Amino acid sequence: MPLIEDPSLLTGFEHAEDAGVYKLSPELALVQTVDFFTPTVDDPYTFGLIAATNALNDVYAMGGRPLTAMNIICFPIKKLAVEVLREILRGGLDKMREAGVLLIGGHSVEDDEIKYGLSVTGTIHPDKVLYNRGAKPGDCLILTKPLGTGIISTALKAGDIDQVLLARSVATMTQLNKKAAELMADEGGVNACTDITGFGLLGHACEMIEGSEAGLRINSAAVPVFPGIRELVESGFVPGGLYRNKDFRISQIDAAAGCPGWLLDVFFDPQTAGGLLISMPREKALRLNGKMHREGIVAAAIIGEVVAENAGRIFVY
């Protein structure tokens, strides 16, 4: 599709950003996003929480503050009880309330398959927008949530999942990136930021350096991963999206012999409501990582660095 050029459009879909940003005045810009998908868990209320979190997090990834949202729901009203629909919407509303977001409407469609999500509008100062590009050599990379939600959801669909592990995954998928974004803004100095969702860690990391003169080095042992993920991967509980992500980006990845194959696969796992991936100068990254731990974001970790060599490529060691 042809790209739209307008001096007020600070970013659209040309760089696969998490949201679009439109400048209204020298002091104010709109942040807009939309996201919806099929259930990743069995409980309808929990699904509503997860779907709303996933959509709201796009605004936080841009450095913005979400203000209003509209429901998007597809539902088989003739096949399932209306109580299921009510619980999905209740979950979404509770998460919007937690984020301080107002529900102002929505749209529903009768469909054989349940789908739910939000269209979200937020605001930001035009000079404070965070983009998924701009990482600079010397930066450190912070990841704020563990990986593996796609693999865990696949095991759940097969009916073979440890309930403790599932509960940990759900807790992560229902955690807003609001606090992480606030701490990031307070520290300042961020050169690039994105949230890890459908393209997996390495897919979104590739976007961070695409078309730039920089490369990335990722320490595989430092990346937070849910316990028990190795067993699930080696048992074959791998979502189709993981293979598609890997096929698309593997040509940009150089993996050292010391990086286990199962772990490299996890780095391509499509995440739901994943954490922020932040690129910022080392000293600031060290301070921010410490602040996150003190504020309860205990999975946050410095997982690698931005380098001047191997432009557009990622070395995983």
Image (cartoon, grey):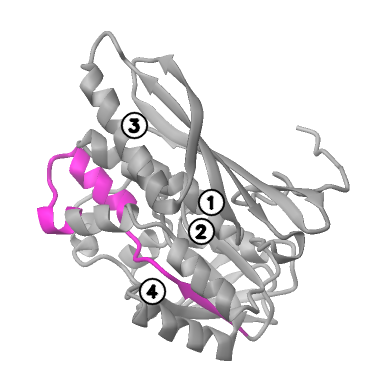
> Which residue is the site of mark 3?
89
- Give x and y (percent) for residue 163: 11, 53
Alpha carbon distance from label 2 to label 4: 15 Å
Left/right placement of residue 50 relative to residue 190 reads left
Left/right placement of residue 219 relative to residue 285 reads left
Q: Quadrant of residue 154?
A: top left
Three-letter amino acid code at the position of disc 1: Asp
Closest to the camera, between mark 2 and mark 1, is: 1
Q: Would you place residue 16 above or below residue 192 in this image?
A: above
Three-letter amino acid code at the position of disc 4: Val
For the question of whether residue 104 can be seen, the reply is: yes
Q: Residues within 10 Å of mark 4 (few under 14, many from 20)?
A: many
Determine contact: label 2, label 1, CB under 8 Å.
Answer: yes
Q: Residues within 10 Å of mark 3 (few under 14, many from 20)?
A: many
Residue at left offset 51%, top offset 66%:
181
Q: Residues within 10 Å of mark 2 (few under 14, many from 20)?
A: many
> Which residue is the site of mark 4?
223
Mark 3 vs mark 2: which is more N-terminal?
A: 3
Mark 2 vs mark 1: which is more N-terminal?
A: 1
Closest to the camera, between mark 3 and mark 2, is: 3
Three-letter amino acid code at the position of disc 3: Leu
Where's the N terminus, which quadrant?
Answer: top right
- Give x and y (percent) for residue 112: 34, 15
Three-letter amino acid code at the position of disc 2: Asp
- Looking at the image, which is closer to me, 62 or 229? 62
Closest to the camera, between mark 3 and mark 4, is: 3
Q: Could you say whether the residue bearing mark 2 is in a helix, strand or loop?
A: strand
Residue at left offset 50%, top offset 27%:
105
**Which label is found at residue 207?**
none
Q: Would you place residue 45 above or below residue 61 in this image?
A: above
**Which label is found at residue 195?**
2
Closest to the camera, between mark 2 and mark 4, is: 2
